[in-house]
Image: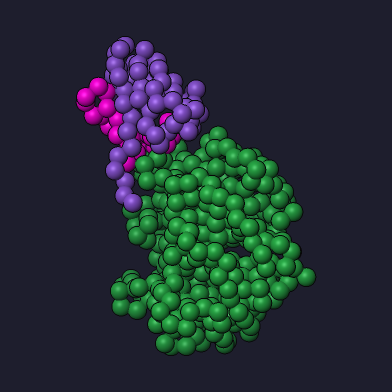
Chain colours: A purple, B green
Amino acid sequence: MISVFIPSQLTSYTGGATRAAAEGATVAEALDDLDRRFPGLKFRVVDEQDRVRRHMRIFVGQEETRDVARPLRAGDELLIFGALSGG
Amino acid sequence: MTQAIQLLVGTRKGAWIYRSDAARQGWSVEGPLFLGQIINHFVADPRDGRTLLAAAATGHLGPTLQRSTDGGRTWAEVKQPPAFPKGDPHGRSVHHTFWLQPGHADEPGVWWAATSPPGLFRSADGGDTWEPVSGLNDHPMYMEWLPPEGGTPDGAMVAGICIDPRDKGHMYLATCSAGVLETTDYGATWRPLNQNVEANFLPDPYPEYGQDSHQIALAPTNPDRIWQQNHCGIYRLDRPGERWERIGNAMPKEVGDIGFSIVPHPRCDKTAWVWPMDGTEVWPRVSPGGRPAAYRTRDGGETWERQDRGFPAEQGWFTVKRQAFVGDGGDPHGLYLGTTGGEIWMSGDEGDSWRQIAAHLPEIYSVSAAHVR
């Protein structure tokens, strides 16, 4: 089980929740799992070519990744943030 | 006879709906909707009167479409917004949907979407799911016509879609780097349609393609007449002709014929409106001389008349983007424009006089007008 931090930009999908649990062996699989429960969420974070969108940031624990194929292990924490994006 | 109108207003920070009384005198406001989201286009389906689509994105999140099937009472995100195929050979991903176009009257439920980077998408279910139009997006000339990294400061794009009301397979696109493209087979094949249209920013100023078409519009009563506001001037083309005529040459020299929008009259194919902007030197894109005005032709572009009554006589530095100057089709034809300074102005007498009906909104990207049913 992966614990996911949901940023404010995405809480409209999660009913206001800022934490969700997800299953998956990679970042992409965890996002797919979230997307099944919260349809549309993944496409707002990752584009159709599997690139993390420019003004979104993903961390696994303390380590930032832009590779959605990055492996995850049970107990990992996946953090999604909105980056700085202007006024 | 007039009729109650609803204005769907898309801004850099959300959407608003303004509704008028039957005389178009009093206006009520609903909103904000989608506060903080960038709404590039917000359009009602004239075929069913109930479906509304809004192209949405934010500074952080990827693009999507919001959809209402009950005239705006309730909203939901569409199931599958426009997206290029995974593994696209050019690596394209949709940055935002720029233009939403209800399909031909004979095809209820069909919508078209134009995007940045340049792409065309089609929905057959009222905008809930979308498929790429391969005939354009995978055209052998795509990278020459529509390079994804080229184009305007807000991103290369297909900027507009016109459908021939007599033939659903006959469509025109306004593009930022290939000028006007035409299909006669429902989007399977395309060709440039730019004869005699200037591109003064290229070594060959009259190329086969390469022009920046800001907006095109078909005359509703004569769809063989195409009006175009181009980056370099105002043009008219009468099909089956191929050679555009620069009708902007008749504009006053001190005003010029640069602009974003062109609005045809719903019942007269000789009448259209433009909103000139300053395209000199570094392209301020504001009202020339700080004196806002629409210009109207009633003779197909042979002459133009200035229409500025009600606007500031001086120090009015309006910028009106291409989707933000529209008509409502009423009689008389109501005209509306939204400024990047967050003001909405209207004319109920076909441009003879103007009044402000809203202010203090965020930067306005689009206005569309529909009759309230």
Residue B126 higher or lower than B279, as above or below: above
The reply, left or right, for residue A44 in relation to residue B347 is left
Q: Is residue B87 visible?
A: no
Q: Looking at the image, which is closer to me, A59 or B148?
A: A59
The reply, left or right, for residue B298 in relation to residue B244 is right
> Which residue is most to the right?
B1
Q: Is residue A26 visible?
A: yes
Give residue B176's quadrant in the image.
Answer: bottom left
Looking at the rendered structure, the number of numbered marks drawn on it comes to 0
**Coordinates of residue B261 in the picture (x, y in percent):** 51, 69
Q: Assign the C terminus of chain B to one quadrant of the image.
A: bottom right
Give the residue at x 29% y 34%.
A57
Give the residue at x 48% y 30%.
A13
Residue B170 higher or lower than B213, as above or below: above
Give the residue at x 71% y 56%.
B372
Q: Assign the N terminus of chain B to one quadrant of the image.
A: bottom right
The magenta span reads A41-69
Residue B92 higher or lower than B228, as above or below: above
**Coordinates of residue B229 in the picture (x, y in percent):** 50, 72
Give the residue at x 50% y 64%.
B359
> Which residue is most to the left?
A63
Q: Looking at the image, which is closer to me, B98 or A16?
A: A16
- State yes or no: residue B358 in magenta: no
**Coordinates of residue B162 in the picture (x, y in percent):** 59, 60
- State yes or no: residue A60 in magenta: yes
**Coordinates of residue B161 in the picture (x, y in percent):** 56, 58
